[in-house]
Image (cartoon, rainbow, N blue to C red):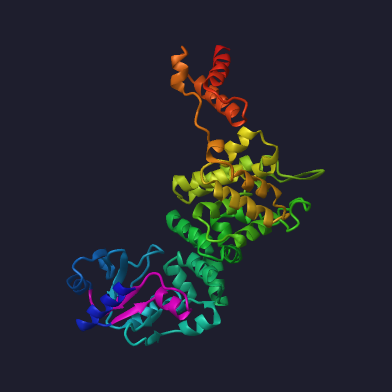
Amino acid sequence: MALAYTVAERLRDAGYEAWFVGGCVRDELLGRPAKDFDVATSARPEELLRLFPGADRVGAHFGVVLVHEGRERVEVATFRSDLAYADGRHPDGVQFERSPREDALRRDFTINALFRNPFTGEILDFSTGRADLAAKLIRTMGDPERRFAEDHLRLLRAVRFAARLGFAIEPETMRAIQRFAPLIHRVSAERVRDEIARILTEGGARRGFELLDESGLLREILPEIAAMKGVAQPPEFHPEGDVWVHTLLMLEGMKNPSVTLALGVLLHDVGKPPTFRVAERIRFDGHVEEGVEMTRAILQRLRFPSDVVDGAAALVENHMKFRDAPHMRESRLKRFIRMDDFAEHMELHRLDCTSSHGHLDNYYFVRDKLQMPAEELRPSPLITGKDLIDAGFAPGPGFGVVLREVEDAQMENRIATRDEALKIARRMLQK
């Protein structure tokens, strides 16, 4: 924040207008902490680079530079109006302006088009921004169809802001989103990915997915999630309702999730619609395996990083194993609970239970097991591959199987010495 005021002061002292604009003004008026401060100014790009010689030219042809000092970053942009949008994402060019009014009229939503004087606190509102904040409404600046035709990503941004802020989408704006929803396919997968990730993690994820459904965007970008609606579940395990309702309840229960956990929650039952069948009772045979494949396909389609894809797929793959935990062999249970990021597996299971039958016995059982000493959970190996070579065995794929069996015996307290471990190894390798 200090850097933003420094930037504004330098612009003012050089004879230029300088206003805080966009999200920082919106959040301050809502009583929320403002994270990123953007400054709009009458100074032209070349004047900005003269005043801030160390600034990065992140979009100089659009009149945007990035001023940085330590960890602080402030985006400074010349007042501008946009020319035509040929690609449905970026204007073909801009026209620099001397007044904030034209700059406000090009922006996406009224609540993001507010300007605040950094020194006097004066607010400039060229539309219905303050009224819409009070009424908790997301409304486009001007004609909604024109705004969405210009930049198709705004379709998703409207949903994200409504979910995050707990606002409604103004009816005419919603009708335009519904009409233009198919245009979201013209937006790059990476930008769609980023908006979905933010809807899932910024708060209001359930509301966000309800709005995605209502707007028609869900069936365009995540048809596999839309397919959950109306897929019944056994009432003795899922008294809350169908797969869609269950998933919404889990989304609602999340508290500051990582992207990986949020995606795991969203997709943990994605394999149920294609595996649904009724045979005496409702069954979803193979839904976990199907869900893992679908999760990988969906997240790769949206260009999520490989570590996120792997993490979410692991959450889907293992979410049903908790029901077997009390009956697992000790070695298998220990291997289960020492998986990478196991806290996220635990949280998904907790949400799964509290959003359905409500029984947390297995959750508490596993939580208690996590209290065991680290040496019990992951004991130091009694033997290694080198020991097997020293014992006269040729290296090969069997080494891994043998060492795993030795570790299992160790974790189950069937052996405790190196000699006992070598005895098991010799018996297996000699076969």
In the image, residue 210 above or below residue 375: below
* x and y percentages locating residue 190 in the rendered image: 43, 55
* x and y percentages locating residue 285 in the rendered image: 70, 40
Q: Residue at x 63, y 46 (%)?
A: 368
Quadrant the N terminus occupies: bottom left
Q: Residue at x 31, y 69 (%)?
A: 75
In the image, residue 136 above or below residue 295: below
Q: Nearer the viewer, residue 361 or 285?
A: 361
* x and y percentages locating residue 290 in the rendered image: 62, 42
Q: Residue at x 67, y 46 (%)?
A: 365
Asked if the magenta segment contains residue 32, the reply would be yes
Q: Is residue 115 visible?
A: yes
Q: Is residue 141 visible?
A: no
Q: Residue at x 54, y 78 (%)?
A: 136
Q: Which residues are magenta?
A: 18-44
* x and y percentages locating residue 24 in the rendered image: 40, 75
